[in-house]
Amino acid sequence: MTINRLMDLPFRRLTENELNWLKNRMKDSREEVRTLAQEIYKQHFPHAELNNQKKQLNIKELEFMVNASVWDEYGDEISVRCRFHLQRSKPLISMQTLDSSAKSVTVELLKGEFNKLLKSLIHYYEIFCWDQDYRSSEGHYVNDDFDLDDQSYQDNLIVEEEASEESDPTWRVSIKYCNNTEQNIKGTHEYLPDKVEELYWNLFEYFYEDEETENCNE
């Protein structure tokens, strides 16, 4: 009876009563009912789990390295080798070049602006998902024409993953969260994924704007 009612739930927006009933079935003592209810809830609210993760995550410290080519606003290709560092305890962003000079510069932000930046890393960039989002582009893409169970495809996948492990990363993110968990994500893409490159430019602009201000004051 309950299973049938779950299966018969409409795909339209659920009424308040229907939603409350579904949520209660997600805590049902019967495993088959609970599992089905949770699956149906995900179908109706595909972003619910992701949004719940966002509410629980706060970045304590972040290190972001880029060693790749990017394109500026004029369409020119620029080689970038640098590392950014942010720490919640201080509203500072440091940028260090990864060449022989190892030059390091730091800018200080207003507390509110800095907190907004930290939140954007979770809520806009969804940086905690980058390992999953960009895993397929480290040497292999999933295509509908491939049989994922085919042995030759699986063997090729293993070879590509091993080659990826031996490649130098073109970007890397190390994150420490306030709940004491840590995350280390890297990519070996020839060209940076959109969100990764967008974050680079976002952080770099703080230093570019600081240089412009100094030039105007001279």
Image (cartoon, grey):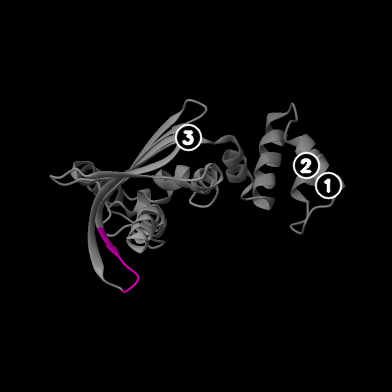
Q: Is residue 128 left or right of residue 17?
A: left
Determine whether 194 is above or below 19 in the image: below
Tell me the residue at 46%/42% (across/down).
128
Q: Amino acid at mark 3?
A: Arg
What residue did someone put label 2 on? 22
Q: Which callout, 1 or 3, points at the residue further toward the start of the chain? A: 1
Compare marks 2 and 3 and give the one earlier in the sequence. Answer: 2
Amino acid carrying label 1: it is Glu
Range drawn in magenta: 69-74
Q: Marks 1/2: CA distance?
A: 6 Å
Q: Secondary structure at mark 1?
A: helix
Q: Which residue is mark 3?
A: 88
Q: Within 10 Å of the Cα at label 2, are there few (<14), some (14-19), or many (20+) other Cα atoms? A: many
Residue 96, quarter of the rendered image: top left
Residue 98 circle label: none
Task: Reply above or below: 101 against 32.
Answer: below
Task: Please state, as top left, top right, bottom left or bottom right, where the C terminus lies in the image.
Answer: bottom left
Residue indicated by mark 1: 18
Q: Is residue 60 magenta?
A: no
Asked if residue 102 shows in the view, the reply is yes
Question: Observer-nearest residue: 182 or 208?
Answer: 208
Q: Nearer the viewer, mark 1 or mark 3?
A: 3
- Residue 122 is situated, as x and y percent measured from the top left of the image, at 52, 45
Write the residue at 28% across / 60% down: 191
